[in-house]
């Protein structure tokens, strides 16, 4: 096994590269993973079949010869309002109706940003440890529960919203891991050093969730989660969730927006995570819904080529924009209703069933609104 000085050196290198937190943990089956099979059996994973990979339940199976996991966290909070601080759908009738994109997807694809930093860290490890060793970098892409490994590497605790929370940084954290065959000294020397759960009696995240996806503290039914519905789910979104989704078109931040540990969370120094866009209407910070709903597939691919938003695919984003148009609550002009009704009528004839059904649902709601 390496020395404690090596572990300190790894954390120092990670911070120098730009990570905000770094810890080392031995690859082992953490206690929380024993509950994962039951979570899957309840159907809470929905259509996310990749979560059924058996390697996710045992980090020792995630890579051959694995001995240690280096967990790194990168703050992506930006000095811009939270979704709970902005008027949904546009602040004034003269504004175009707006949608909300989750904070993590405003800027460049976080996978690429994390991979670059993780690969830099791996290069420094090879300079420090000259003997051959195996390693593999994952940025929310591998068969490992990063947030659980992060807990036992000392980066924070798992909050009632199921996310990693850090007392100083809050929860606006991207997690990346380096799996390695190096036998590294863990950052924590005993179970007593694992960061304590500081959620206490607070339940703001549970009470604020519009779809009641947090069925109880620390337990998420992904099938009800707005992030799952707008990103992972293919086809039509169940009607019971269409109105509660509101103006969300990619992901959701509500359970983080209301978390007390995020009230004074520091902002990131990484400019990659600031909102992309060529104009205020086309910014990814509360973008114009008519613009998004009117994109064709080629335009979508060009605009979101280097963005995490590409995961929802063109069909998903247009479907979501249609629903958000149907949920617009700010009074609009007759011209707006006529214009949007024309757009939704066109989309209602789409060959994609999810788009067509969402457009028809939204058009029916807009026609019911007084003008």
Image: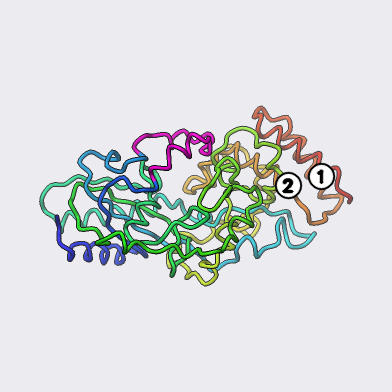
- Dot 2 crowding, Cα within 10 Å, few <14, some 14–19, many 20+: many
From the image, tell me which residue sits under label 1: 366
**For the residues bearing labels 1 and 2, Cβ distance under 8 angstroms:** yes
Secondary structure of residue under mark 1:
helix
Note whether residue 254 is visible: yes
Secondary structure of residue under mark 2:
helix
Mark 1 or 2, nearer chain start: 2
Position above or below: 226 against 87: above
Q: Along the line of sight, which residue is nearer the eye, 237 or 155?
A: 155
Residue at (44%, 62%) from the top-left corner? 197
Which residue appears farthest toward the left when viewing the image?
131
- Dot 1 crowding, Cα within 10 Å, few <14, some 14–19, many 20+: many
Which residue appears farthest toward the right when viewing the image?
370
Residue at (27%, 42%) from the top-left corner? 60
Main secondary structure of the magenta stretch: helix
Q: Along the line of sight, which residue is nearer the eye, 127 or 262?
A: 262
Q: Along the line of sight, which residue is nearer the eye, 102 or 308?
A: 102
Image quadrant assignment for residue 194: bottom left
Apparent side of residue 299 relative to residue 17 in the rendered image (left or right): right
Position above or below: 73 against 234: below
Percent across and percent down for residue 140 are: 40, 47
Which residue appears farthest toward the top when viewing the image?
351
**Magenta-span inclusion, residue 333:** no
Apparent side of residue 333 relative to residue 328 in the rendered image (left or right): right
Which residue appears farthest toward the bottom when viewing the image?
264
- In the picture, which quadrant includes the N terminus? bottom left
In magenta, the rendered stretch is 33-55
From the image, tell me which residue sits under label 2: 325
Mark pair 1, 2: CA separation: 8 Å
Percent across and percent down for residue 319 are: 65, 39
Apparent side of residue 71 relative to residue 181 in the rendered image (left or right): right
């Amino acid at each position: 096994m390496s020395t404690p000085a090596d572990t300190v050196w790894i954390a120092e290198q990670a911070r120098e590269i730009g990570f905000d937190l770094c810890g080392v943990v031995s690859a082992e089956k953490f206690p929380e993973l024993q509950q994962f099979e039951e979570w899957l059996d309840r159907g809470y994973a929905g259509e996310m079949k990749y979560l059924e990979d058996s390697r996710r339940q045992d980090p020792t199976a995630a890579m051959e010869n694995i001995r240690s996991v280096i967990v790194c966290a990168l703050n992506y909070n930006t000095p811009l309002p939270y979704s709970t601080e902005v008027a949904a759908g546009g602040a004034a009738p003269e504004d175009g109706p707006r949608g909300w994109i989750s904070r993590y997807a405003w800027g460049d694809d976080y996978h690429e940003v994390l991979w670059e930093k993780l690969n830099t860290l791996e290069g420094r490890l090879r300079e420090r440890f000259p003997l051959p060793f195996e390693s593999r970098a994952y940025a929310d892409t591998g068969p490992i529960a990063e947030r659980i490994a992060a807990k036992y590497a000392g980066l924070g605790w798992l909050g009632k919203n199921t996310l990693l929370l850090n007392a100083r940084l809050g929860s606006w954290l991207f997690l990346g891991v380096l799996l390695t065959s190096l036998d590294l000294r863990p950052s924590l020397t005993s179970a007593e050093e694992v960061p304590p759960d500081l959620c206490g009696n607070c339940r703001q995240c549970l009470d604020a969730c519009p779809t009641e996806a947090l069925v109880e503290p620390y337990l998420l039914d992904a099938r009800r989660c707005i992030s799952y519905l707008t990103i992972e789910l293919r086809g039509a979104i169940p009607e019971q969730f269409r109105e509660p989704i509101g103006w969300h078109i990619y992901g959701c931040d509500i359970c983080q927006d209301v978390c007390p540990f995020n009230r004074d969370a520091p902002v990131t120094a990484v400019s990659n995570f600031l909102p992309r866009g060529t104009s205020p209407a086309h910014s990814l910070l509360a973008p114009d819904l008519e613009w998004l709903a009117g994109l064709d597939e080629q335009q979508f691919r060009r605009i979101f080529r280097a963005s995490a938003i590409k995961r929802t695919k063109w069909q998903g984003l247009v479907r979501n924009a249609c629903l958000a148009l149907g949920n617009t609550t700010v009074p609009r002009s007759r011209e707006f209703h006529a214009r949007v009704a024309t757009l939704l009528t066109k989309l209602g004839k789409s060959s994609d069933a999810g788009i067509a059904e969402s457009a028809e649902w939204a058009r029916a709601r807009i026609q019911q609104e007084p003008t």
